[in-house]
């Protein structure tokens, strides 16, 4: 009877330990992983919208600049949210790359805006479609995609940890 009692205690301890590990892995995914993944996706989409409206004001003239400014503000809000969620050391170089790309994008946008205001639309169009701004957009979307990839990889790892703990607990019980 004592052996059965000891076995039951071991089973209960394994189950409690397994549940705690599963809860921790689940919390990591729900609290950190998925929100960062979603924030990166939203920032990527906002960056695409921002570049589209920038191209539109280059093509249509200053009357479309306000559309761009609204999209730029939406992107900044999305980026601020992503940065706020990115407290881990592994996030810092990814966020730094995004911020550097944003700075270059903004620098080039100021140049585009000056050209559009001065009615040099053909030069502005070349910059936005084949020149410096196209490269800046590429750098920005590449940096955002790297963040998306890293956050997706982390969620996959956390989910695998959860599944492994669940499987081990079930086997031991």
Image (tube, rainbow, N blue to C red):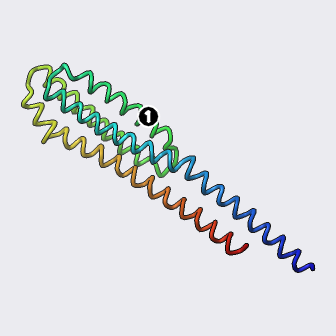
How many C-alpha atoms fall within 10 Å of the one at disc 1: few (<14), some, or many (≥20)? some
- 19 with respect to 120 (left or right): right
Residue drawn at (71%, 74%) of the image: 172
Pinpoint residue 8: horizontal percent, then vertical percent.
83, 72
The quadrant of the image that shows the N terminus is bottom right
Within the image, what quadrant is residue 18 found in? bottom right
- 85 with respect to 126 (left or right): right
Residue drawn at (83%, 76%) of the image: 7
Within the image, what quadrant is residue 54 found in? top left
- Counting the numbered discs, the total is 1
Name the residue at the right extreme.
1
Pinpoint residue 57: horizontal percent, then vertical percent.
18, 26
- 163 with respect to 105 (left or right): right
Give the residue pinned by disc 1: 80
Q: Secondary structure at mark 1?
A: helix
Relative height, residue 152 to residue 7 (above, below) = above
Pinpoint residue 167: horizontal percent, then vertical percent.
62, 70
Q: Nearer the viewer, residue 23 or 116?
A: 23
The quadrant of the image that shows the C terminus is bottom right
Residue drawn at (22%, 27%) of the image: 110
Pinpoint residue 33: horizontal percent, then vertical percent.
51, 50
């Amino acid at each position: 009877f004592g052996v059965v009692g000891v076995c039951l205690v071991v089973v209960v301890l394994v189950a409690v330990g397994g549940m705690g590990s599963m809860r921790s892995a689940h919390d990591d995914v729900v609290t950190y992983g998925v929100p960062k993944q979603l924030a990166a996706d939203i920032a990527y989409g906002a960056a695409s919208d921002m570049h589209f409206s920038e191209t539109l004001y280059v093509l249509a003239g200053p009357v479309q600049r306000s559309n761009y400014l609204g999209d730029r503000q939406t992107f900044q809000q999305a980026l601020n949210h992503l940065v706020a969620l990115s407290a881990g050391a592994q996030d810092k170089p990814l966020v730094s790359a995004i911020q550097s790309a944003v700075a270059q994008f903004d620098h080039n946008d100021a140049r585009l805006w000056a050209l559009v205001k001065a009615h040099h639309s053909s030069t502005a169009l070349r910059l936005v479609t084949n020149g410096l701004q196209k490269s800046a957009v590429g750098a920005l979307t590449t940096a955002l995609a790297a963040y998306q990839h890293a956050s997706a990889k982390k969620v996959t790892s956390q989910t695998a940890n959860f599944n492994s703990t669940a499987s081990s607990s079930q086997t031991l019980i």
